[in-house]
């Protein structure tokens, strides 16, 4: 198991599962950990190649450091606003720049959003499903970016190592 970041604050855990994989498709499990708690309470089955592509697209959004919501808003109000921005009623308006959920989390109904609060802080807002409470975590600026960069590098290494085994 590979853990990227600090699970006491924010971390991403990834494990490749050889028994679930084929020569062409690498499967595994992954989860987000906030304050030593796994979001959703469990690891989620994941196809690692598409997760890598998704995480790279998230990196682009994180590097922009979008600020959309006032830091005075409650977690629930900010979450609702970011959810409406990220999942609009029409596809023409679609803008998912604040979503940091991986495919496996989205498939499980877990929404995780990110925003910059000010020049020192950022926050993650999350819900473990429809009707569940909204969680909020304030982090030092660039924490989420750093964790995603490490996780992308680690996931690339996992996938590259499996490609090397196929050619052997």
Image (tube, rainbow, N blue to C red):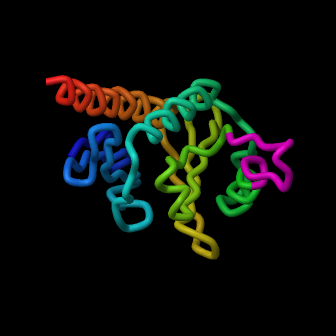
Q: Quadrant of the C terminus?
A: top left
Residue 125, percent across and down?
Answer: 58, 54
What residue lies at 47% left-to-right and 54% top-to-bottom? 104
> Where are the magenta residues, as a range?
84-96
Residue 56 or residue 68, whichever sits in front = 56
Q: Can residue 135 be seen at all in this image of the molecule?
A: no
> In percent of the image, x 26 and y 27: which residue is there?
163
Instruction: Give the number of marks.
Output: 0
Give the camera-side residue of 21 and 122. Answer: 21
Query: Is 132 situated above or below 105?
Result: below
Residue 127: name its quadrant: bottom right
Q: Position of residue 113 (x, y in %)?
A: 60, 48
Res. 142 visible in picture: yes
- What residue lies at 28% left-to-right and 45% top-to-bottom? 22
Apparent side of residue 145 relative to residue 111 in the rendered image (left or right): left
* Residue 86 among magenta residues: yes
Residue 77 image offset from top left, x and y in percent: 74, 60
Answer whether residue 1 is magenta in the image. Answer: no
Q: Left or right: where does residue 113 sit relative to residue 80?
A: left
Q: Is residue 84 above or below residue 49?
A: below
Position above or below: 117 against 125: above
Image point 32% across, 57% down: which residue? 36
Specify the quadrant of the image occupied by residue 89. bottom right
């Amino acid at each position: 198991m590979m853990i990227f970041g600090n699970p006491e604050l924010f971390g991403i855990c990834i494990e490749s599962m050889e028994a679930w994989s084929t020569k062409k498709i690498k499967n595994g499990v992954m989860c987000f950990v906030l304050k030593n708690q796994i979001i959703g309470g469990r690891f989620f089955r994941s196809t690692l190649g598409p997760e890598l592509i998704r995480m790279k697209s998230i990196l682009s959004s994180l590097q922009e450091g979008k600020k959309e919501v006032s830091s005075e808003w409650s977690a629930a109000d900010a979450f609702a606003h970011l959810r409406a921005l990220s999942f609009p009623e029409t596809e023409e308006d679609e803008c998912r720049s604040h979503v940091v959920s991986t495919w496996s989390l989205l498939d499980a109904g877990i929404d995780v959003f990110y925003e910059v609060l000010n020049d020192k802080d950022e926050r993650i807002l999350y819900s473990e499903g429809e009707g569940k409470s909204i969680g909020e975590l304030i982090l030092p600026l660039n924490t989420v970016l750093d964790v995603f960069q490490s996780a992308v590098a680690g996931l690339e290494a996992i996938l590259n190592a499996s490609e090397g085994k196929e050619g052997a």
